[in-house]
Amino acid sequence: MTLKVREILEKEIFTRNDIISLLQSEGEDRTLLFKKSAEVKEKYIGNKVWFRGLIEFSNICSKDCLYCGIRKGNTNLTRYNLSDEEILTAARFAYDNHYGSIALQSGELESKFVTDRIENLLHKIKDLSDGELGITLSVGEQEPDVYKRWYDAGAHRYLLRVEATNQSLYKKIHPEDSRHDFYRRLSCLKSLKDIGYQTGTGVMIGLPFQTMDDLAGDLLFMNDFNIDMCGMGPYIEHVDTPLIAYSGELMSPGDRFDLTLKMIAVLRIMMKDINIVAATALQAIDAIGREKAVKIGANILMPNITPGKYRDNYKLYDNKPCTDDSTEDCQSCLEARISLADAEVIYGEWGDSKHYDLRRRLSAEN
Ligand code: 5AD
Ligand code: FES
């Protein structure tokens, strides 16, 4: 029997079918979903937003994901790698402007050089901020001992999107080789959690071949895995990637956007106290896309603080917003926008996942 959306929203635990119904809700039902998710956010998080100053420090990548604009096989872009000094300057900017945290993101490379470099940068960033800047890393799959070294050096959150939890979909959007192994992805997520990171994952929404059932499975995975943070956004095609061949089969960008909001709303109701990012990709489709996400459940924003001259070359997808803004422009425009969404930007705080605190406390008691 299929329940009505109003009945589903009263339940404590959603089944796969419930989630599918919520993701397909339209009209009044959709309004009810968003009303409920906004209430949950208000109750468990408050109408607050924390910043993670995003430093996209290199677009050099050893992988070839079929959707991604910085994939190794794309020769149509200039590769860059910020100097340590440039990274530290960006981190100092975040600290001086009272951002609680930064996020260091790059293409995926595994090497002793990269491990040592990031470890060294983490120490320096901690030093320049008297240990106050929180640091999220998002540099892909690595060996457990590498994750451990970075954790010991001061990174305390890690974002590794699983991209798609249905293994057959995962295979369709990645090359079939050992560098793009679904099980390694899962084992990396497990290592991160075991080491003690606040662990975040996420998926792309509106991918070719993806079904509502896949998306419901993604949310159930996040719940079962007991993640602390989530970053998910609409899939946006990039002309220089193999998946561009399937553009004709996609939902409209507007529908991908709407479905992403629904995914965020359902996840907020399922996992009340986790951190959820309002992804930049939302803004590539709708000028006030991130603000809309904040209204219905997201509580983290990642203002781009990568030096402007490099930004144009970190195009994971086409139409990426703000690539020509200066860092300061980004901050003031974001702040005004967030207050339009009736939310408040909280400065000088890490804004850790409350879910993580609770999870750690419970495991310490057992
Ligand atoms: N559209 C939307 N998101 C993308 N990402 C990569 N390529 C695309 C795309 N074409 C996302 C992936 C990755 C994150 C850094 O960016 O989910 O994990
Ligand atoms: Fe770089 Fe996927 S293309 S990790």
Image: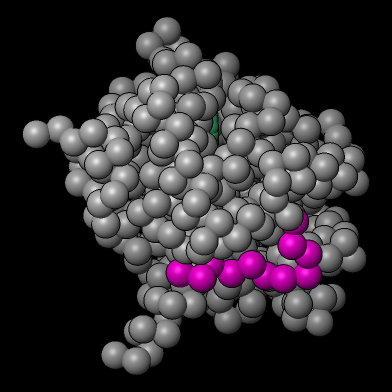
Q: Magenta part mainly helix, strand or loop?
A: loop
The residue sitting at the bottom extreme is 365
- Left/right placement of residue 184 relative to residue 86 reads left
- In the rendered image, residue 348 lying in the magenta stretch gets the answer yes
Query: What's the residue at 35%, 64% (across, down)?
Result: 226
Q: Which of 41 and 218 is in front in this view?
A: 41
Q: Which of 284 and 193 is in front in this view?
A: 284
In which image quadrant can residue 322 be found? Answer: top right
- Left/right placement of residue 324 relative to residue 21 reads right
**Where is residue 161 drawn, in percent x and y?**
45, 49
The residue sitting at the top extreme is 248
**Where is residue 283 drawn, in percent x and y?**
65, 31
Q: Nearer the viewer, residue 244 or 75?
A: 244
**Where is residue 197 drawn, in percent x and y?**
49, 72
Q: Which colour scheme is used?
A: one colour
User: Looking at the figure, which quarter contains the N terminus?
Assistant: top left
Query: What's the residue at 35%, 40% (across, down)?
Result: 164
User: Looking at the figure, which quarter contains the C terminus?
Assistant: bottom left
**Where is residue 349 drawn, in percent x and y?**
72, 71
- Left/right placement of residue 102 relative to residue 237 reads right
Query: What's the residue at 83%, 65% (across, down)?
Result: 98
Q: Which of 276 and 241 is in front in this view?
A: 276
Query: What's the residue at 75%, 40% (across, down)?
Result: 340
The residue sitting at the left extreme is 1
- Would residue 62 be seen by someone viewing this image from the given angle? no
Q: What stretch is highlighted in magenta?
A: 345-355
- Would residue 225 be seen by someone viewing this image from the given angle? yes
In which image quadrant can residue 131 be found? Answer: bottom right
Compared with 230, 360 (above or below) is below
- In the rendered image, residue 132 lying in the magenta stretch gets the answer no
* Number of residue marks: 0
